[in-house]
Image: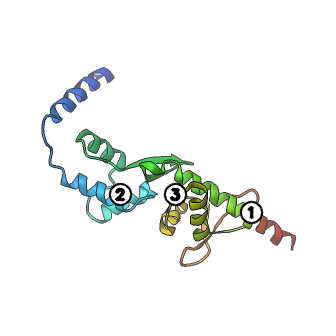
Amino acid sequence: FKITRERVRQITSKFVCNIKQFYVYAPTLKRTIVHINNHIPAPVDDTQADLRRLGITQSLFCLDGAISAARLLAVSVPFVIEEHGGVRMVIRHEDVGLSKFIVGLARKMVSHAGLGKVEDLCDLVQEKRGASIDGPGVARILQSLSSLHWLDERKDWFFLDNMRRNHLVGLVAKV
């Protein structure tokens, strides 16, 4: 017994039409969306783990499913999932492209100076894009990079080890 895509589409469209006739009480979905909105930008994996840790979900629940359910139930979703470089981030609608922009600036900073400072990166984002983002938000975006190494316990200074050109490493090698 095989089911075709067309049959799946027919069944789901009938379900969607039926469900839109009723008010669906979904407090956990709304609590999930509020929690995510209060903690973005953040990596999707961290957000899913956080929802489980807080007991909002019982297992690692896919955020794409929460977004789909919210849209189906006409619940406003103030964020999107953006992917770049294999890393999926939860960000606000107005910040689409911001995580990619921040990673690009961090790479330029490390290439030029050898290392980077989160506070300086925040200032650069404000200056170049006009978007205000706090240090913890930038740190969460940087944390998603596999090449990141924090140079201090407060996570103010960072180093990216996969840079082809790094001015500081070049100087040290010459010495």
Mark 1 touches mark 2? (CB < 8 Å)? no
Q: Which residue is mark 3?
A: 131
Q: Taking 14 as reference, is 48 left or right?
A: right
Q: Which residue is mark 1?
A: 112
**Dot 3 alpha-carbon crowd within 10 angstroms: few under 14, some 14 to 19, many 20 or more:** some
Q: What is the spatial separation of the Cα atoms under label 3 and label 1, in whole angstroms? A: 23 Å
Question: Which residue is pictured at 28% across the width and 25% down the height?
Answer: 9
Q: Which residue is mark 2?
A: 37
What amino acid is found at the position of numbered circle 3 in the picture?
Answer: Ala
Say which of marks 3 and 2 sits in front.
Answer: 3
Question: Which residue is pictured at 55% across the width and 73% down the height?
Answer: 155
SS state under label 3:
loop
Q: What is the spatial separation of the Cα atoms under label 3 and label 2, in whole angstroms? A: 17 Å
Question: In which image quadrant can residue 158 be found?
Answer: bottom right
What amino acid is found at the position of numbered circle 1 in the picture?
Answer: His
Whichever of labels 1 and 2 marks the residue nearer the N terminus, that label is 2
